[in-house]
Amino acid sequence: MEATLVEPLALPQQASHPLEQALLNLGVEATVLEEVESPSFTRIKISPSHKVPFNKIAGLGDTLQISQGYQNAPLITPQKGHVAIDIPKANAERKFCEYLDYCGYLGSSFTVPVGVDINNNLVEVDLSSSVSAHLLVAGSTGGGKSEWMVAAICSLLTRFTSDAIQLYLVDPKLVEFTKFQDYQQVTLINENNVAIETLRKLCNVMQERYELFRKTRSKDLSEYNKYHAKIPRIVIFFDEFSAFVSGEFKNEFNSALAEIAQRGRSAGLHLILATQRPDASVITPLIRSNITARIALKTIQSQDSKIILGTEANGFDSSKLLGKGDLIFSDGGTFQRLQGLYVSDCDSLLANIETKVLTNEASPASLDELHSYPGEANAEDTGEAISALGQMPLNQGFLKSDSKIFALVKLKIAENMAGSNDATEPLFNEIWGLTPEEKLLALRYLLNQKIGKENAISILWNRNSGGKYHSKYQDCSNTYERMILELKNQGYSSHNYWGFS
Ligand SMILES: Nc1ncnc2c1ncn2[C@@H]1O[C@H](COP(=O)(O)OP(=O)(O)OP(=O)(O)O)[C@@H](O)[C@H]1O
Ligand SMILES: [Mg+2]
């Protein structure tokens, strides 16, 4: 009798996790690796069988919403070594990220907070970095653009004084930024024509800064600020910029935008542009090519997401976000889902920040002041780039002829370095004839230039430690030490570059 071979019956496959089962029912073999809770969703990390391409899983969001009864379609994204399926929490269960709980983690460099990641870490974006000097923030109404900008503005106002930042807040709706108008660092702009005029002036400021850097042989603002009187970074926030892209100011806006986006970073100018109209006519190729760091809040359609984040944002679809600060951040290469910070009590947060004193004098934030660099007028006389050396940031005010002193000291340093002993009278008599107060200023300049004690004494009193002036050298040395002490008493130190940084 011939034996009959019976095909073994295929055992019904059993999954240990409901999502594994749901995927299996849809023909996708995958193993659940881990579940992680975030304030707004539960992330289920799965490892699909090697036969399943990512796009097949990515296309299952709507079907899973129906079969599993999720409140929204899950966001399905590729991650390193796994696929993340973010199951949204019901609205009532969602939690938010209060600014005060995270601001202690803000770094000291020129960053703004972007949001909190799945591991509860604060993610910041560094505006002084070349990939993220400018930001695009887009999403439909209620997505959380204004709240995001409020958190960013608060983070700058609480960490940087007006000599380090100036903020230009363009708010045609007259609602979002009015609360910031009294702060020294802030210039509030409510009218479109004023916004355009300001952009134009800021382009000039940028130009002048480049000129200043060229004269002082500084690579960029960071380097310049290390050695000279600080000039502030400027951040321009647009709560809604779509009106500028196509309206009567289109040409001026586009040319200023291109200029600042392309050359602003080195000069310390940064743009943060927000819009609730993420369509191709607003987020133009000009913006897309110049602003690579993007924040997508919830959008209506997937198409909008592609316009904000680019088509390469495979799976990162902002139409699947939950609104209210749920966002996707792209720094030009990687994508991250984050929850934006929420400032619940702006007034108390900013209570200790200095507001503007209303006097007849121009406000410190005025453009005219940004145009002028300390000591500029006298710098012309010497043909030297000493323009930024004269400001005394510790509220010491200006001495009458400080730039002249710097010019003289500078020439004297050159003379000293060249090893020449025969001082060219009467030019150097002037330096030896300085008043004690002026000598202090000159000494600060020498210290700032890292000129050592012996050379400083030689410059300030024409005394060398050897030779015929030897007997008087000790006197000068004592005076020098007394002056150093006096400067320290005034609050200067090597930490603040003797008051010049
Ligand atoms: N990060 C957040 N955390 C918690 N709630 C938020 C957050 N962001 C926004 N919200 C809530 O969503 C509401 C709308 O946010 P927001 O005004 O920032 O939206 P928008 O994108 O600026 O909208 P529009 O385009 O209409 O100006 C806020 O009033 C707040 O209640
Ligand atoms: Mg808004």
Image (cartoon, helix red, strand yellow):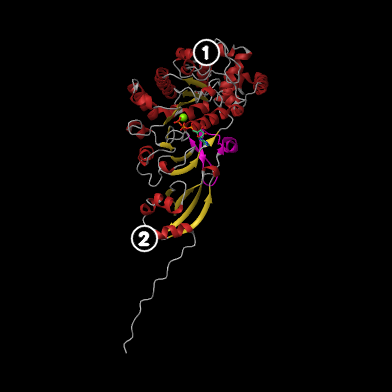
Q: Quadrant of residue 196?
A: top left
**Percent position (x, y) of residue 107?**
55, 36
Q: Nearer the viewer, residue 100 or 204?
A: 100
Give the amino acid at mark 1.
Ala
Label located before the other in sequence (1 or 2): 2
Q: Which residue is mark 1?
A: 362
The answer for how far apart the CA atoms under marks 1 and 2 are is: 68 Å
Name the spot of residue 358 as percent of width and height, x first: 57, 13
Residue type, numbered disc 2: Lys
State the SS at label 1. Answer: loop
| Residue 487 numbered mark, or none | none
Query: What residue does disc 2 label?
Result: 51
State whether residue 20 is above or below residue 399: below
Q: Residue furthest bottom?
A: 1
Residue 220, given in percent of the width and then of the height, sits at 45, 29
Which segment did they paint magenta? 97-126
Closer to the camera in the image, 90 or 159: 90
Q: Secondary structure at mark 2?
A: loop
Q: Is residue 416 above or below residue 115?
A: above
Q: Nearer the viewer, residue 239 or 73?
A: 73
Answer with left or right where residue 475 lies relative to residue 103.
right
Q: Locate residue 471 relative to residue 177 in the image: left or right.
A: right
Quadrant position of the C terminus in the picture = top right
